[in-house]
Amino acid sequence: MWDYSDKVKEHFFSPCNAGALDDANAVGDVGSLNCGDALRLMLKVDPDTETIQDARFQTFGCGSAIASSSALTEIVKGMTLDAALKVSNKDIADYLDGLPPEKMHCSVMGREALHAAVANYRGEEWKDNHEEGALICKCFAIDAVLIEDTVRANNLSSVEDVINYTKAGGGCSSCHEGIEEILVKVLAERGETFNPHTVELKEEAQPAKLTNLQRIKRIEIVLDAMRPQLRRDHGDIELVDVDGKTIYVNMTGACSGCQMEALTLQGIQQKLMEDLGEFVKLVPSRAGSLSRAASHP
Amino acid sequence: MDGIYLDNNATTRVDDTVVAAMLPFFTEQFGNPSSMHSFGNKVGLAIKKARLQVQELLGAEHESEIIFTSCGTESDATALLSAIKSNPEKKEIITTSIEHPAVLALCAHLEKEGYKVHRLKVDERGRLDLDAYARLLSDRVAVVSVMWANNETGSFFPVLEMAEMAHAAGVLFHTDAVQAVGKVPIDLKTSKIDMLSLSGHKLHAPKGIGVLYLKRGVRFRPLLRGGHQERGRRAGTENTAAIVGLGLACEQAMQHMHYENTEVKRLRDKLEAGILARVPRAFPTGDVTNRLPNTSNIAFEFIEGEAILLLLNKFGIAASSGSACTSGSLEPSHVMRAMGIPYTAAHGTIRFSLSRYSTEAEVDRVIQVAPEIVAQLRKLSPYWGDNGPADEPDKAFAPVYA
């Protein structure tokens, strides 16, 4: 039995806004081919304010599909269309206190129905652009299509790569056989053979050649390459120290204290790992913030 | 626990007398049957008795043809891997498209290692084309593996006839009889079946015990090596208590064989007829005139199985579904797909599987509750109108699929 939250059960056993909405002027019919679930979302939109006055649904699907539909109608009632379009599948899942990873697609279907209904209201044609594959990583709910596309787009060749790019396989590691099967397939497409030992080889070979000084120079080159982008946003980055796999940097200008700082660091860390061919951790330097504090008494 | 348990093809309740027979083997009779001292000698005798009880139920010619394993899946894997290892020059396997994953997933794996796997197709009732089967039999085939009864629909395959055909072609024949053993009479000594798998927990014995029947003289390569147990064919210290439990459960299955095929069958038929009479747009799946006496698989059109199960569970009724959403894989039942059941019906398939513990009152209650649940869910379904399916349901609702 699925581990459904009480909220999911509540919305399944007593769904809100179920049934046809006769005077609907925005209807979205979508389905998930993968599991066969399908949903019709009906909205009554006030043409003057573009506010959703009423929302109802009909769902052919499992417990979490019905609960997600019910949650969706509750969330969007009273919203303007533009505000409703910002509702993500995660918002739907959060409203239900979470869904099992295998069931996240139910919330995705809800969001898609919403987009389809708005498109229907505005006389546009809605096209679905997301394809769903068999669920591979249950820890992080990552499916085969996403892994395959990422492997192809980034020329990945190892399970470690896949973990770094998609998170898939980074939890309990039970799905590594499935990830390897995808790698075998995609590597064969580009005429390569999957070698399960490439990671170890790479890790042993490359860092051995780099002296600490060489590494620091390589890091500087990567940071220099990132700099124009940061400066465009009136920020900058400086290298403070390198201690083994930990790289300390100082975020300056607009970057310092920016809400997006963590995201920026993550991106730079990714670039560094790709260039150095090893795992590194990028840490905003405490020394940096101390010196900042000192210079602004 | 109170409740109406109609999911006996998934697993069964261990009979109280079976539990009682097992208990001494955890405490007073804990010895290793291989030991020389007196702690072990009664245990060896108990295992011997259990082996005879299993032999009796299967109609095996020799008790040494019974190999105790840990489960049905292990028995299946042992049988198939032994067949291909003892016939290394044969690189083909014949099975069906509606086998249990214990066989299908193993075959898919062997396919990656270079084996050619023929999966026999089934028709809309789940029946095989024996001419197609005959054409595939050749000296390139290492083993045929065909289930005796399907776990989802209960339908039988003609395994006795298929074993004769395989034998005539010089091909080993294995059957996964996990659902059939204990529910239908079996007499292996007069059959050409070389190997048969059974699982204890499907016939009121505990989980964690299975049997591989291996006809005397069939070439065999063990899966587990490392000890003399089971005459060196399955190493590992015997699961004594479970073996004793399985032996008694087999004896009881033999005693209840008639009841299973009369009274349990009557209740199953009553349940099925009762639901079908009260629910429009519902139909039984599989080969309904040729199936296990305890199983009924009903497709409820335009609604989804997990939703039905959740509501049944609210009324204390346990069943199972072929819907995608009840399995972790999101894949709809491969059995329903193989039979070509349209997905708006396949997703709403519910399997009711009874046992000798099922009662008339339970069946009556399900006949009363199930139609209400179906009606309640159909109110939510975009394929369903006010008083029945929308006119041309496929046109009334044609969603954009991702």
Image (cartoon, coloured by chain):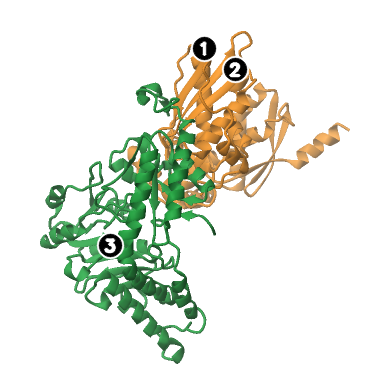
Which residue corresponds to mark 1? A122
Helix, strand or loop at label 1? It is loop
A272 or B21: nearer the viewer: B21
Instruction: State whether residue A161 is above or below residue B16.
Output: above
Q: Are marks 2 and 1 in contact (CB under 8 Å)?
A: yes
In-image side of B93 versus A112 (left or right):
left
Q: Colour of chain B?
A: green
Task: Tell me the tag on residue B184.
Answer: 3
Q: Amino acid at mark 1?
A: Arg
Near-viewer residue (A225 or B325): B325
Give the percent coordinates (x, y) of residue A232: 65, 21
Neighbourhood count class around disc 1 (C-alpha, 10 Å): few under 14, some 14–19, many 20 upward: few
Image depth: mark 3 or mark 1 in front: 3
The residue under the point 81% across, 34% down is A292
Residue occupying the far bottom of the picture: B37
Hue used for the chain lettered A? orange
B207 up-or-down from B309: above or below? below
User: Do the residues marked 2 and 1 share a common chain?
Assistant: yes
Viewer can see residue B123: yes
